[in-house]
Image (cartoon, rainbow, N blue to C red):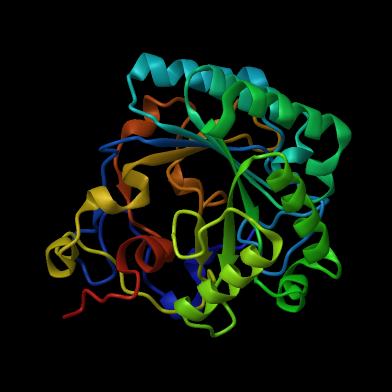
Amino acid sequence: MKDLQKSAANLGKFQDAFVTADGQQRASVPLSHPETLWFNTGTLCNIECSNCYILSSPTNDALVYLTEAEVKGYLDQIEDRNWPVREIGFTGGEPFMNPEMIPMARAALERGFEVLILTNAMRPMMRKTVKAGLLALLEDFGDKLTLRISVDHHSAELHDKERGAGSFAKTIEGMEWLQDNGFAMAVAGRTVWGETDAEARAGYAALFAEHGFAIDAQDPGQTVLFPEMDETVEVPEITTACWGILNKSPDSVMCASSRMVVKRKGAGAPAVLACTLLPYSPEFELGQTLEEAERPVQLNHPHCAKFCVLGGASCSA
């Protein structure tokens, strides 16, 4: 896998978990309010997208399928640790490639959690058995279940450029089925084509209106727009002084409120990671249990700075 830390743009940085390249104390983030526990259902996917941050494909099984029993074990740990988790998220790969996706979602819903499933809404979701399982979940739990659909761009041309010819039409077909049956939906797009946020949201709004999708393009929670994860871009390291300079709290960073469970190929048990964006960086693996995963996270990666702390700001001033 790519070693994002050895990018030439950040040479010399992000080497020591506790000290930055210029000798300052590196910032860390405690798990202050665990609200979401993510499960990566496996890296296998029915398609292979350009620039997929997790390198999902029809052949990549670096992260293997989780099982219902393994998910239930972590749901038990949430209760044992008294974590105030509101939401269970499932991501991949394509989650509906995992044959136990429906039982895993049901296990979380039965515990009273909201469930979010990230999907491309293509063939794996549209199989008869999966559709029947989803309809049963909808009947039993209603809008406690949300499916977030990957629509890289609001135009077929640019979406298919990332995901392959014909993929846009197949995704829209899946979304129409979800809409017709009353499922709660959200969309995840990308911002790699030079559009402003307003332009992108206007494009998605037109797409949703055309198909009658009950999704608010202006709501960042319903239409999530992700930037390109380019590890060649130079970013500053985050020191403890940055919190005050940026007027930002560690509580606002994603690893203050979430963790992700994965199972690596050949591993005897799943592991808990600090971040959904760093599945292949061993220093962000916190252990096999939620108790072990309660320790603070050292912000020792370019993604920590660019995506989770800075968001376009700078702490150099």
Residue drawn 23% across and 52% down? 250
The answer to whether 100 is drawn above or below residue 125 in the figure is above
Q: Is residue 278 above or below residue 285?
A: below
Residue 100 visible at all: no
Residue toward you, 201 or 55: 201
Q: Nearer the viewer, residue 12 or 28?
A: 28
Name the image quarter holding the N terminus: bottom right
Q: Is residue 66 visible?
A: yes
Q: Position of residue 310 (x, y in %)?
A: 31, 68
38 versus 158 height, above or below:
above
- The reply, left or right, for residue 68 in relation to residue 225 is right
Q: Is residue 300 left or right of residue 156?
A: left
Which residue occupies 68% across, 58% down?
A: 55
Indicate the quadrant where residue 10 lies. Answer: bottom left
- The percent coordinates of residue 221 (x first, y second) are 45, 54
Residue reaching furthest to the bottom:
194
Say which quarter of the image contains residue 301: bottom left
Quarter of the rendering occupied by the C terminus: bottom left
How far across and down, in percent of the image, does residue 151 sit? 66, 62
Q: Residue at x 57, y 18 (%)?
A: 72
Number of numbered discs visible in the structure rendering: 0
User: In the depicted view, which residue is nearer to us: 118 or 306?
Assistant: 118
> Quadrant of residue 66 in the image?
top right
Q: Is residue 194 left or right of residue 131?
A: left
Residue 148: image location, x then y, percent: 60, 49
Query: Which residue is at 76% across, 73% downward?
Result: 156
